[in-house]
Amino acid sequence: MDSFESLLNRVQHCTLCASHLSDEPRPVVQIQPSAKLLIIGQAPGRKVHETGIPFNDASGERLRQWLGINANIFYDKNRVAIVPMGFCYPGKGKSGDLPPRPECIPTWHAQLLSHLKELKLTLLIGQYAQHYYLPTPAPTLTENVQNWRQFGPKLLPLPHPSPRNNIWLKRNLWFEQELVPELRKRVATALDLT
């Protein structure tokens, strides 16, 4: 079995789906075996692709607000792992970014996640992560997030924090009233912030 450092190096230099991307591959992951919190999102957007820093955009600002943590904690790779469904920016589609490339999941996810022995909480952001990782995913993201209580204390489905989801958030006020306070509690406990 690869050492973690060797595995991470291979991930960071992966070009598996280069022929399907509009830009050069630039895998964006943040992970160390000591991480207690795992965030599985969709794929890097344009700004994240350019900077190489996960959630370095308006989505990240909202996500950190939901989690109740600052950027210093969020970007501490020894505490917070960020492993998107697709590691590279997939390019632009007709109504936003294209879906995450499917190659990363079977190639890298199990190998990377097997090193997270200290993990206390996993957040599944968006429909792609929820469809793949929830034990019994519902047909819609809204149903998955509404059913958050059924997934136990170590797994939480969340909507994407993108500004594109402002309408969803206005239609689902229960999310910020009920789930966000519980999310903050669980994050604080997982990261020993209490």
Image (cartoon, rainbow, N blue to C red):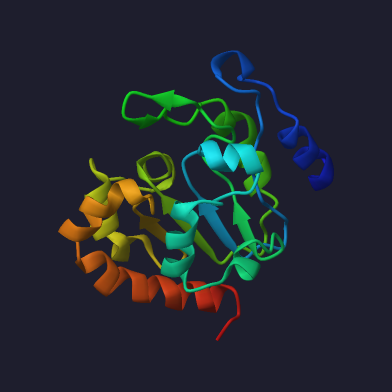
Q: At 72% across and 63% down in the image, what residue appears?
A: 78
Counting every numbered tag in the picture gives 0
Q: At 65% across and 21% down in the image, what residue appears?
A: 16
Q: Is residue 11 left or right of residue 134?
A: right
| Along the viewing direction, whichever of 35 and 75 lies nearer the viewer | 75
Q: Is residue 15 left or right of residue 120?
A: right
The percent position of residue 54, horizontal first and vertical second, equals: 59, 49
The percent position of residue 45, horizontal first and vertical second, equals: 50, 38
Q: Residue furthest left?
A: 171
Image quarter where the N terminus lies is top right
Image quarter where the C terminus lies is bottom right
Q: Is residue 10 above or below residue 145?
A: above
Residue 44 visible in image:
no
Q: Residue furthest top?
A: 19
Q: At 49% across and 65% down in the image, what residue appears?
A: 64
The percent position of residue 141, horizontal first and vertical second, equals: 27, 47
Residue 10 image-quadrant placement: top right
| Along the viewing direction, whichever of 74 and 39 lies nearer the viewer | 74
Residue 162 visible in image:
yes
| Along the viewing direction, whichever of 122 and 43 lies nearer the viewer | 43
The percent position of residue 109, horizontal first and vertical second, equals: 60, 39
Q: Is residue 50 above or below residue 93?
A: below
